[in-house]
Image: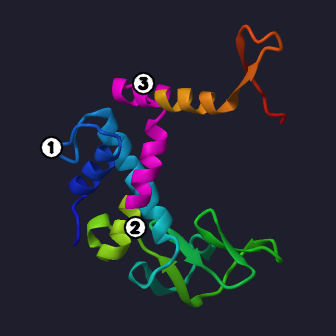
């Protein structure tokens, strides 16, 4: 089932036990972070080049610019070797100059809104973004998260300590064994 941007933001907020947003443009800092995380993940997934996000175009020579111009609106462009994109133009690396002839059938990655993606890809973006958001928000100091972090730290520390008996048999020592790096 396709989700709206607001629904996706709320999935991320639920992942960190934060309150749901009422709008996608909520001024809340966590909402802004969730939107940014979703956008980064969306662009990363689009750059894989799925059929729904790839178009084929012809690039023509722009005599005014002195190069085959490439629109900065594309998320990615797949040029034949040895060409690359430099300064919004096609760069001919071996000849150390901008390319000056049209190039046909070039694949470009176009920007697709989250709502316009196939639901399977949309869900993948949201799940990946939720995991990333959870990791990034762990640095926050909200009381619930801080309590969880302290409990996890205490558990990790407990597993790093070994209890040994004192040779006298009178007391027990808790000795931490440090791991060599």
Whether the magenta-drawn stretch holds residue 143 is answered as: yes
Closer to the chain start, of discs 1 and 3, is 1
Whether pointer 1 and pointer 2 mark residues with C-beta atoms closer than 8 Å, the reply is no
Q: Is residue 50 left or right of residue 1?
A: right
Q: Is residue 91 left or right of residue 10?
A: right
* Secondary structure under the numbered disc 2 in the rendered image: helix
Residue 31 in sight in this render: yes
Residue 155 horizontal/vertical position (percent): 55, 31
Is label 1 or label 3 in front? Answer: 3
160 or 78: nearer the viewer: 160
Q: Quadrant of residue 173?
A: top right
Closer to the chain start, of discs 3 and 2, is 2
Which residue is rendered at x = 22% and y = 72% of the image?
1
Residue 101 horizontal/vertical position (percent): 65, 86
Please tell me whether residue 72 is drawn above or below residue 94 in the rendered image.
above
* Residue that mark 1 sits on: 22
* Secondary structure under the numbered disc 3 in the rendered image: loop
In three-dimensional space, the C-alpha distance between marks 3 and 2, rounded to whole angstroms, equals: 28 Å
* Residue that mark 2 sits on: 124
Q: Quadrant of residue 157?
A: top right
Whether the magenta-drawn stretch holds residue 60 is answered as: no
Which residue is rendered at x = 63% and y = 74% of the image?
67
Residue 149 horizontal/vertical position (percent): 48, 30
Please tell me whether residue 138 is drawn above or below residue 49 in the rendered image.
above
Which residue is rendered at x = 48% and y = 86% of the image?
57
Closer to the chain start, of discs 1 and 2, is 1
Look at the image and give the residue range highlighted in magenta.
Answer: 127-150
In three-dimensional space, the C-alpha distance between marks 1 and 2, rounded to whole angstroms, equals: 23 Å
In three-dimensional space, the C-alpha distance between marks 1 and 3, rounded to whole angstroms, equals: 23 Å
Which residue is rendered at x = 21% and y = 61% of the image?
4
């Amino acid at each position: 089932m396709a989700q709206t941007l607001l629904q996706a933001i709320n999935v991320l907020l639920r992942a960190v036990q934060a309150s749901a947003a009422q709008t996608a443009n909520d001024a809340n800092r966590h909402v802004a972070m969730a939107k940014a995380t979703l956008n980064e993940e969306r662009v990363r997934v689009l750059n894989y080049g799925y059929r729904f996000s790839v178009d084929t175009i012809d690039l023509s020579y722009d005599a005014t610019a002195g190069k085959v111009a490439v629109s900065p609106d594309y998320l990615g462009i797949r040029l034949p070797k040895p060409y690359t994109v430099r300064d919004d133009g096609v760069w001919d690396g071996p000849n150390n100059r901008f390319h000056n002839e049209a190039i046909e059938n070039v694949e470009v990655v176009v920007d697709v809104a989250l709502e316009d993606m196939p639901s399977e890809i949309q869900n993948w973006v949201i799940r990946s973004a939720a995991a990333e958001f959870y990791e990034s928000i762990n640095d926050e100091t909200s009381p619930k998260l801080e309590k969880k972090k302290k409990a996890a730290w205490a558990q990790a520390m407990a597993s790093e300590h070994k209890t040994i008996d004192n040779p006298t048999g009178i007391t027990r020592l808790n000795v931490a064994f440090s791991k060599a790096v």
